[in-house]
Image (cartoon, rainbow, N blue to C red):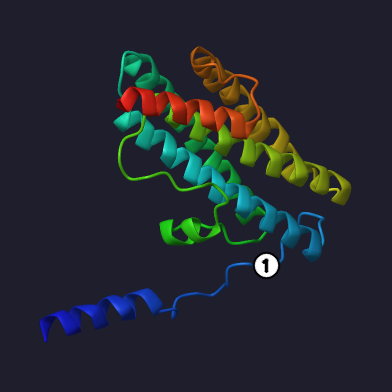
Amino acid sequence: MYLTLMKQKNSDRTHHNGSEFQRYGTVVDRAISLDNKIRSTSAEKLNQILADTITLRDMYKKHHWQVTGPTFYQLHLLFDKHYAEQAELVDTLAERVQTLGGVAIAMAHDVAETTHIERPPRGREDPNMQLFRLLQAHETIIAETREAADSTDEAGDAGTNDVLVSDVLRTNEFQVWFITEQLTIAGVEGKPSEEAAELVAGGRRGHDR
């Protein structure tokens, strides 16, 4: 009886929408000289990048906690530095969505359903695999950001374009430089994604033996 009541209570809390006055995916009027369609399209693109940035941010913290091996100290610090920088991007992206009159994606389950970044396992992984996962996540975000930057430039949404280029793109490109240099020791730098993944996986198998 108690468990049934608790499940009902959690269900009511999850589905209670009485205080929701703007649905996700909509935009309200903003006096910023951009029409509704442009703001809606920009908000949609920003929310995808936001979901992926939240995922990358949290992946950095996971790796910060779980990293191991002889490079533990330097990676422990690097991952936390990049985490903080990604956290700033999360806030910048979310605030731009709201500025456009949209609704920023926020909760973990919504982010998990939206992100394009592959989910890592719960357990610990070899540092090279951690680095490779981060590199792939950055590449995903960079590709999305370039596409969105071109789109917002054509639409005349200069404010969103500036956020995408000056903040998101440059931060991710800069972090890719640091991650790539860390992977150089594994012979992964400059390799195509599939070949690099095999090198990392092969190194991990050798480490396990």
Residue at horizontal 43 percent and vertical 34 percent from the top? 60
- The residue singled out by tag 1 in the image is 28
Q: Where's residue 205, x and y in %?
A: 38, 29
Instruction: Examine the image and state in which quarter residue 17 appears.
Output: bottom left
Residue at horizontal 38 percent and vertical 15 percent from the top? 74
Residue at horizontal 39 percent and vertical 79 percent from the top? 16
- Left or right placement of residue 80 versus residue 52 in this view: left
Q: Where's residue 10, x and y in %?
A: 28, 75
Q: Quadrant of the C terminus?
A: top left
Observer-nearest of 186 and 4 = 186
Q: Where's residue 101, x and y in %?
A: 66, 61
Q: Where's residue 153, x and y in %?
A: 84, 44
- Left or right placement of residue 25 versus residue 206 in this view: right
**Residue 207 sits above or below residue 58 on the image:** above
Residue at horizontal 63 percent and vertical 48 percent from the top? 96
- Residue extending farthest bottom: 1
Q: How many residues crowd around disc 1 within 10 Å: few (fewer than 14), some, or many (20 or more)? A: some
**Residue 41 sits above or below residue 191 on the image:** below
User: SS for tag 1?
Assistant: loop
Observer-nearest of 185 and 149 = 185
- Give, as a three-letter code, the residue at label 1: Val
- Residue extending farthest left: 2
